[in-house]
Amino acid sequence: MAARNISQNARPAAVLTVAVALFLATAASCVTGISLLFPHSILSRIWELNRPAYIAFARLGRLPGLLLLALGALCCAIAIGLLRRKRWAWWAATFLFSVHCLGDLMTLVFYGDVVKGGSGIVIASLFLFCLMLPGTRQYFDIRRGLPQG
């Protein structure tokens, strides 16, 4: 009986995988956001990799930088919530990766960018798959149907 309780409480590898990915997304969002807010800092060198994106972001002023910092904070909060076994974090991660998948689908359909759209769909779908695994759902006590408290 005690062995069964231990296995039910053990964190699935899929949860750790998703949390690590969200921490990496936190870092990427924050570095990108800071580089937009402080365009002449050492971080601004990252834009040498994608100058057209920088020009598009820069035209919008400070808003993209602030939104990227907010996205970083959200990803960090969700990752911490997943590691602390919070049900809201499972729902938030599921929503986040679903939106990501839909955004990449739009990129694929409207821009025909198979590399960006297709790879984004595959990656987001893999994280959704991790979240939908029976062991992960059981770990967060997610049942079919409506969300629970």
Image: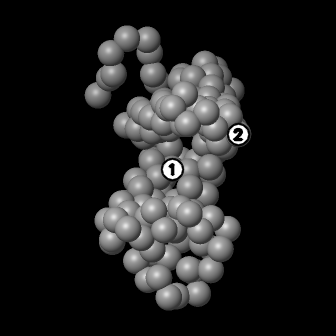
- Asked whether the viewer can see residue 75, the reply is yes
Label 1 near label 2: C-beta < 8 Å?
no
Is 39 situated above or below 13? below
Residue bearing the label numbered 2 = 115
- Residue at the image position 60 percent from the left and 19 percent from the top: 134
Relative vertical location of residue 67 with respect to residue 12 in this rendering, above or below:
below
Q: Residues within 10 Å of mark 1 (few under 14, many from 20)?
A: many
At a point 33% along the width and 71% down the height, the residue shown is 61
Task: State the image coordinates of residue 27 (x, y, percent, origin top left).
Answer: 56, 65
Please, what secondary structure does the residue beneath circle 2 have? helix
Question: The N terminus appears in which quarter of the rendering?
Answer: top right
Q: Quadrant of residue 111?
A: top right
**Amino acid type at mark 2:** Val
- Label 2 and label 1: CA atoms lie apart by 27 Å
Q: Residues within 10 Å of mark 2 (few under 14, many from 20)?
A: few
Q: Nearer the viewer, mark 2 or mark 1?
A: 2
The numbered disc on residue 106 is none
| Residue furthest left in the image | 149
Label 1 secondary element: helix
Q: Is residue 118 left or right of residue 140?
A: right
The quadrant of the rendering that contains the C terminus is top left
How many numbered marks are there?
A: 2
Side of 56 relative to 145 (left or right): right
Percent x, y of residue 54: 51, 68
Considering depth in this image, is 35 or 148 the residue closer to the camera? Answer: 35
Q: Residue furthest top?
A: 145
Label located before the other in sequence (2 or 1): 1
Q: How is the image coloured?
A: one colour
Residue that mark 1 sits on: 79
